[in-house]
Image (tube, grey):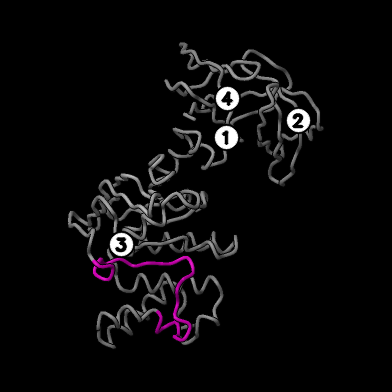
């Protein structure tokens, strides 16, 4: 088993608190993602779990064993770095075998394990090549094989896909997820890429200023953001200032711009915005009691859909997705009405 408990951890660098009283439980076998922009503390937290950084306060537990001050090489973790950190003077085989040799395993066992893991990552045909003879995707898989071959209890990955092109990143997401599930490993993945987080994770911790802004499943983070920060970071929602809200039998009556709409979301906060995904607003011809007025500012054609940028009468801008089959190629300046899905969310600013 490999349950991880992070208990009120703090890390400071001089006057700057990078991780601030953060607590978290990660379950055995879970693919857990630390998500957020640069500087939010996600890599610092990962490196504390790895043992490369010691927290100033708090504890780290692995299956209830306190590992806060345990050296990195004794933590039974495998690490995949952003730049892969392969030995340039060693072959693929020797790179992958390195951790096993450090652990003084027999040559027979090393050969068996390295051969097996290279077959799993489809690299058995390049075992005598050097890193500079490999593609970016192959180097990434060598780094992954090196981390997995030691049979770690926890697999740690620090933005391992950021140096790959878009197509290869998508392919490697699936490879990593499949290997993690086959091995039944606890995996902690650091990224700033929302697509990676949504497509790979069992749960996601969205970090902000060294704290967890929202901890949820991918579906929960996207469909039910609790803050404007979460709504904007995941899915880049439109955020509209709310003038007032009233609870009714039909739902929450929300006053925005020049109209009122009914939604299902409730929030008792005092400083609220309406989070509207680009697919949650519909351009319609006529204004009624559940629409607001808007004007077309621009249109981007993207094949399967067009993205319209619209202006409300209070100056707020919204992006709206229109499927190509429904796109009427509206001209700039066209006055339209917008109807909103009842699944739009009220979020705290």
Per the rendered image, the range of residues in magenta is 71-95
- Whether residue 69 is visible to the viewer of this picture, yes or no, is yes
> Disc 3 or 2, which lies upstream in sequence?
3
Say whether marks 2 and 4 touch (CB < 8 Å).
no
Say whether marks 1 and 4 touch (CB < 8 Å).
no
Residue annotated with mark 3: 154
- What is the distance, in whole Å, between disc 3 and disc 2 at their CAs? 51 Å
- Disc 2 on helix, strand or loop? strand
> Disc 1 or 4, which lies upstream in sequence?
4
Residue that sits furthest to the left in the current view? 65
Looking at the rendering, which quadrant does residue 209 occupy? top left
Residue 263 position within the rendered picture, expressed as x and y whole percent measured from the top left: 52, 21
> Disc 4 or 3, which lies upstream in sequence?
3
Residue 273 position within the rendered picture, expressed as x and y whole percent measured from the top left: 53, 26
Q: Residues within 10 Å of mark 4 (few under 14, many from 20)?
A: some
Numbered tag placed on residue 296 in the rendering: 2
Residue annotated with mark 1: 277
- What is the distance, in whole Å, between disc 1 and disc 2 at their CAs? 17 Å
Q: Nearer the viewer, residue 194 or 171?
A: 194
- Disc 3 on helix, strand or loop? strand
Q: Residues within 10 Å of mark 2 (few under 14, many from 20)?
A: some
Residue 255 position within the rendered picture, expressed as x and y whole percent measured from the top left: 57, 16
- What is the distance, in whole Å, between disc 1 and disc 4 at their CAs? 15 Å
Q: Closer to the observer: label 1 or label 4?
A: 4
């Amino acid at each position: 088993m490999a349950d991880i408990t992070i208990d009120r951890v703090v890390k400071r660098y001089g006057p700057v608190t990078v991780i601030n009283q953060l607590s978290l439980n990660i379950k055995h076998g879970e693919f857990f993602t630390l998500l957020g922009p640069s500087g939010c503390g996600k890599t610092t937290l990962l490196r504390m779990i790895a043992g490369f950084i010691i927290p100033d306060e708090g504890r780290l537990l692995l299956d209830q064993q306190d590992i806060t001050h345990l050296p990195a090489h004794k933590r039974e973790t495998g690490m995949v770095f952003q730049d892969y950190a392969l030995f340039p003077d060693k072959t693929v085989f020797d790179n992958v075998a390195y951790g096993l040799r450090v652990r003084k395993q027999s040559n027979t066992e090393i050969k068996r394990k390295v051969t097996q893991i290279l077959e799993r990552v489809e690299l058995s045909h390049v075992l005598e090549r050097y890193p500079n003879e490999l593609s970016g995707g192959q180097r990434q898989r060598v780094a992954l094989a090196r981390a997995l071959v030691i049979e770690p209890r926890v697999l740690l990955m620090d933005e391992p896909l950021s140096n790959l092109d878009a197509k290869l990143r998508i392919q490697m997401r699936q490879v990593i997820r499949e290997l993690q599930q086959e091995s039944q490993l606890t995996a902690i993945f650091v990224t700033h890429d929302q697509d990676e987080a949504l497509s790979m994770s069992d749960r996601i911790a969205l970090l902000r200023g060294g704290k967890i802004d929202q901890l949820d499943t991918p579906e929960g983070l996207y469909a039910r953001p609790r803050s404007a920060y979460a709504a904007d970071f995941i899915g880049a929602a439109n955020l509209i200032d709310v003038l007032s809200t009233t609870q009714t039998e039909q739902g929450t009556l929300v006053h925005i711009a020049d109209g009122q709409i009914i939604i299902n979301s409730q929030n008792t906060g005092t400083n609220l915005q309406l989070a509207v995904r680009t697919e949650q607003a519909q351009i319609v011809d006529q204004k009624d009691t559940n629409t607001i007025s808007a004007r077309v500012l621009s249109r981007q054609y993207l094949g399967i859909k067009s993205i319209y940028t619209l202006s409300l009468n209070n100056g707020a801008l919204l992006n709206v997705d229109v499927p190509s089959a429904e796109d009427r190629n509206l001209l700039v300046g066209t006055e339209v009405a917008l109807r909103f899905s009842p699944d739009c969310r009220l979020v705290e600013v």
